[in-house]
């Protein structure tokens, strides 16, 4: 394999449990990945709502997993307590979640095939009004986040229950990032969520924000790119979706620093 990233230090900011694949792809191409999660993941403070949903899973027609973390913090409990109901159709945001669901024995998962976001999930034929009106839908997610899925499905006539099965929080220090900047070793960041980008900006003092503004930032979604530009970032690279799209853009980038 060619090594187009040789000599490049690239920060991977996915949650720790999802960072290894992208870091490995960067390393395979000669780069030095540095993992610095901008979102910390932990179990939900109150497990009661998830336990209640597990007890009555057969009442739902669709269960939407908003992220791989939603799978990891719910499926082990479901498998341990009761198994997956045969009449319940799983919906995932992207291919990595489809694979993870299959590892727990959940097959024939619905998922978009191009962009991997809530809008694409809502575009699936199986989630249109004629299909979901009068149906009960479970959304498994972290705390907070966008309400687009739930609100749109309710507008389409569904009864929607949202359950937070994990907690997202920001790191309390940007020291690893500042250290790389101060030593002139950081070539780029990859940022995979708007929430992570906001967390990063909130962590930085004015001099560090100025460094962020001139550092190449690779993002896999137009929504993140728009936010980055609104925050003053000057080198925002919009990539194709998922890890493969990010690493392809990194590999093809015209690097400025020798």
Image: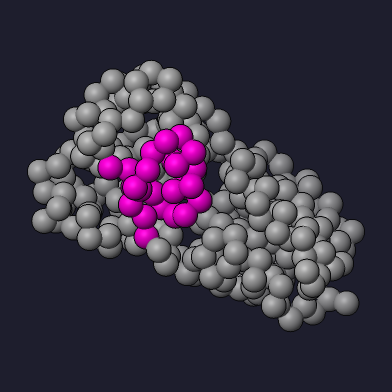
Q: Position of residue 164 (x, y in %)?
A: 39, 33
Tell me which colouring the rendered structure shows: one colour
Q: Position of residue 237 (x, y in %)?
A: 61, 73
Q: Is residue 63 visible?
A: yes
Give the camera-side residue of 3 and 139.
3
Q: Residue at x 79, y 47 (%)?
A: 176
Give the camera-side residue of 108 and 19.
108
Q: Along the horizontal axis of the image, is 225 left or right of 246?
A: left
Residue bounds of the magenta highlight: 89-112
Q: Along the horizontal axis of the image, is 122 left or right of 48?
A: left
Q: Residue at x 44, y 55 (%)?
A: 94
Q: Position of residue 146 (x, y in %)?
A: 37, 50
Give the camera-side residue of 207 and 101.
101
Q: Residue at x 47, y 54 (%)?
A: 95
The answer to if 101 sits in the magenta stretch is: yes
The answer to if 183 sits in the magenta stretch is: no
């Amino acid at each position: 394999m060619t090594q187009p990233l040789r000599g490049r230090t690239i920060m991977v900011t996915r949650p720790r449990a999802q960072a290894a694949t992208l870091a490995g792809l960067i390393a395979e191409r000669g780069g030095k990945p540095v993992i610095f999660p901008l979102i910390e993941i932990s179990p939900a403070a109150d497990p009661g709502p998830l336990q209640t949903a597990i007890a009555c899973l057969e009442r739902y027609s669709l269960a939407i997993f908003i992220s791989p973390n939603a799978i990891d913090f719910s499926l082990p409990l479901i498998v341990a307590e009761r198994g997956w109901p045969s009449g319940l159709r799983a919906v995932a945001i992207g291919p990595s979640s489809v694979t993870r669901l299959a590892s727990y024995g959940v097959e024939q998962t619905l998922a978009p095939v191009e962009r991997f976001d809530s809008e694409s999930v809502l575009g699936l034929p199986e989630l249109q009004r004629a299909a979901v009106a009068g149906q009960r839908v479970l959304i498994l997610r972290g705390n907070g986040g966008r309400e687009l899925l739930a609100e749109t499905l309710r507008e389409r006539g569904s009864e929607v229950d949202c359950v937070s099965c994990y907690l997202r929080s920001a790191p309390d220090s940007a020291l690893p990032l500042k250290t790389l900047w101060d030593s002139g070793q950081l070539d780029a960041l990859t940022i995979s969520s708007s929430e992570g980008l906001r967390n990063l900006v909130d962590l930085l003092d004015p001099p560090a924000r100025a460094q962020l503004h001139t550092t190449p930032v690779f993002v896999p979604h137009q929504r993140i790119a728009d936010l980055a530009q609104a925050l003053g970032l000057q080198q925002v690279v919009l990539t194709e979706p998922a890890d493969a799209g990010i690493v392809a853009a990194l590999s093809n980038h015209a690097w400025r620093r020798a």
